[in-house]
Image (spheres, rainbow, N blue to C red):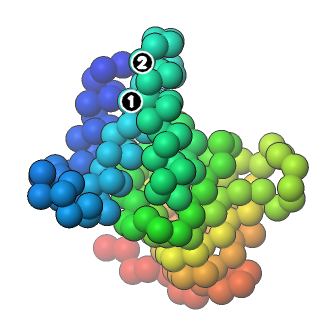
Amino acid sequence: MIRTKDELKFYFKADFNRFGKRPSIKDWILKNEWAYIYKYQKILRYLEYYENNRNKILFYFYFIRYKRLCFNLGLDIKTGNLGPGARIMHIGSLIRIKKRCKIGKNCTILPGVVIGNKYLEENNDFVTIGDNCYLGLGVKIFGNITIGNNVTIGANSVVTKNIPDNAIVGGVPAKVIRFKNVE
């Protein structure tokens, strides 16, 4: 949760260092997707900040912009979920992250990732994803799950059990393929 201006600056710096540079006018004219992802993450961070600081006018201003971008880009990431340095790689396929989730710093998310419920009705399951994780294309995470730090989850995997640190997992249901060499 972003509560102060210093935290907001820290989150912006961490997020946008992974982009390399700010979008130029050329990027907006050519409608490059990373410019829209940049804009989405910026609005999401402002929304988190104004949600906690109870400035209703600015909160609603950013909320309307956030909802429009969610609909247009196919992203549904609730506020307070993404840690600093999060990177959304592409748009086009739905990315949905439920409200009761915490993702660590420097996490990379590819299209089609769904972190949600096992059933139609809302439940109290909480998903925790560690730092420096890579969620591959089409990953689904269901249930009360804890994923360790430095984990890579392969494409189209369905995670239903906890995953330890430094693991590479894949399959339906996801199983540990091997562990990374940590030096």
Q: Position of residue 169 (x, y in %)?
A: 58, 80
Task: Locate residue 120 relative to residue 171 in the image: left or right.
Answer: right
- Compared with residue 29, is residue 50 higher up or lower down, i.e. above or below? above
Q: Nearer the viewer, mark 1 or mark 2?
A: 2
Q: Position of residue 154 (x, y in %)?
A: 53, 81
Residue 113 falls in image quadrant: bottom right
- Compared with residue 28, is residue 166 higher up or lower down, i.e. above or below? below
> Residues under labels 1 and 2: Cα distance?
9 Å
Identity of the amino acid at label 1? Tyr
Q: Which mark is residue 46?
A: 1
Q: What's the residue at 57%, 64% (across, down)? A: 94
How many residues crowd around disc 2 within 10 Å: few (fewer than 14), some, or many (20 or more)?
A: some
Q: Earlier in the sequence, mark 1 or mark 2?
A: 1
The residue beneath circle 2 is 58
* Secondary-structure class at tag 2: helix
Q: What's the residue at 47%, 21% (across, down)? A: 59
**Disc 1 + disc 2, Cβ < 8 Å:** yes
- Compared with residue 172, is residue 47 higher up or lower down, i.e. above or below? above
Which residue, as the protein is rendered here, is positioned at the far front?
29
Quadrant where the C terminus sits is bottom left
Q: What's the residue at 51%, 76% (across, down)? A: 137
Q: Nearer the viewer, residue 162 or 46?
A: 46
Q: Nearer the viewer, residue 64 or 89?
A: 64
- Compared with residue 183, is residue 38 higher up or lower down, i.e. above or below? above
Q: Nearer the viewer, residue 170 or 77?
A: 77
Residue 29 falls in image quadrant: bottom left
Q: Position of residue 66 (x, y in %)?
A: 47, 39
Task: Locate residue 113 relative to residue 145 in the image: left or right.
Answer: left
Q: Which mark is residue 67?
A: none
Identity of the amino acid at label 2? Leu
